[in-house]
Amino acid sequence: MKRLRERFGRPLRLALIGGGPASWIGRMHQTAAELDGYWRVVAGVFSSDPARSREAGTELGFDPARSYGEVRELLDKEKAHKDGIDAVAIMTPNDTHYPYAVAALDAGLDVVCDKPVTHDFAQACDLVVRTRKEERLFAIAHGYSAYPMTRYVRELVRDGVLGELRLVQVEYIQSGLATKLENAPRNNRLRWLLDPRRSGLALVMSAIGCHAQHLACFAAGRNATRLCADVRALLPDREVIDYVSALFELEGGARGTFTVTQAAAGGENDIRLRVYGEKGMVDWSHRSASYLRLQIQGEPVRVIGRGDPFLSSEIIAAGRVPRGHPEGLREAFANIYAEVAQERMARALGEATPDLPYPTIEEGAHTMAFTEACLASQTTGAWVDIARTPPT
Ligand SMILES: NC(=O)c1ccc[n+]([C@@H]2O[C@H](COP(=O)([O-])OP(=O)(O)OC[C@H]3O[C@@H](n4cnc5c(N)ncnc54)[C@H](O)[C@@H]3O)[C@@H](O)[C@H]2O)c1
């Protein structure tokens, strides 16, 4: 039987919203989407300035006729195009994610959106409702939960290899705000990033905390229910939040610890996950993303690598090159794009839709609820419940 992509008959067509020439995450989305042949990136809006957007499209090698000046123009013209887009990927400053996602869903398109998915929990719940009502797909670019080895952690927990879950420890440490960037000349990026109305409820949560929370809950295969948080700026006289540490409880009662900061001088970029159950533990770090340390109590430590032949076909398929050759965030992003495409193609063909692990808008809503709970806990100095996404 022909593979899904062949049965569908063509690659899906994607437009970028954001991701101009200077944005590294723009190239990450663009190249990851195309990596497996499921998508062609054919159009975009690359700047809030219409003239600059058109120029940027040409600079990036896009068809000038499909390098649009603004999002409304993109949606209207692509709708009228004989080979119009199937989806958009949104990677603009954070305050624009929600309105652009609404506009894309209303236009009948699937959405891959960068994080934080919205400004707050209410907006994220609204996107959940719209996505379901329009029977669309909505993925969030949480790349860390799309690595073969973090997917394997989830499998180990799900299959009971670690025994009953006891503790999840997640930390995401960066050095990007270790100096007083507020005193540096403001470029376009710093202008929106350092303005909490644009970057979100808590800067470190918008930037990296959301990834850490998502990874912890993804690996555990369950949401968090309550938390108690310390939310602050580590640098003196800083107004934006650069540090959050929290104790949390997961559905079923397992405990969690969470530490994220961008103010760790020398910290560069690392996200680490440890999961402990009644029988043993696993330890994964982004610095060595293709490997996982598994220690079952009383047995020798095992270092399991991406591509090890005993892994399940789903985990093996999440890697692309033979063991010993590095893979990274681009391939993780590509897993998200490939899965969204597989689900869209299967739905279009009327075939059974596979249960794929890409991060969904429901998970995005939980992340926003977690962030709001951290802020509420800081205000009250107490444990607080994390809001549940209303069923629709
Ligand atoms: N998932 C990840 O790992 C990851 C990593 C980095 C950034 N991000 C997210 O990507 C987004 C962008 O971050 P960045 O660091 O690239 O920011 P940036 O300011 O460097 O780039 C933003 C890009 O969007 C364009 N843009 C701005 N307003 C626009 C508009 N109204 N319409 C179209 N294009 C517009 C700009 O021209 C620029 O090219 C943020 O939401 C950020 O949280 C995600």
Image (cartoon, rainbow, N blue to C red):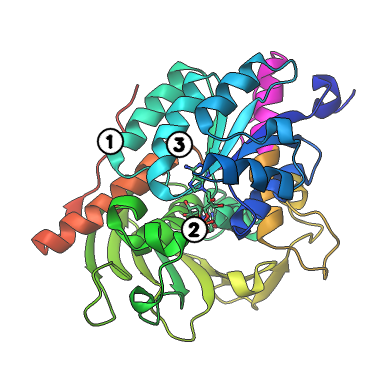
Name the residue at 23% across, 52% down. 373
Q: Pick whichever, 124 or 215, lies toward us.
A: 124
Residue of label 2: 163
Find residue 122 and name its label: 1
Q: Amino acid at mark 3?
A: Ile
Name the residue at 12% across, 60% down. 379
Secondary structure under badge 1? helix
In the image, is residue 254 part of the stretch drawn in magenta?
A: no
Between circles 2 and 1, the one closer to the viewer is 1
Query: In the image, is residue 117 above or below residue 286?
Result: above
Instruction: Determine which quarter of the picture holds residue 127.
Output: top left
Secondary structure under badge 3? helix
Residue of label 3: 361
Magenta part of the chain:
339-358
Label 1, label 3: how far apart the Cα atoms are: 12 Å
Local packing at callout 1 (Cα closer than 10 Å; few below 14, some 14-19, many 20+) is: some
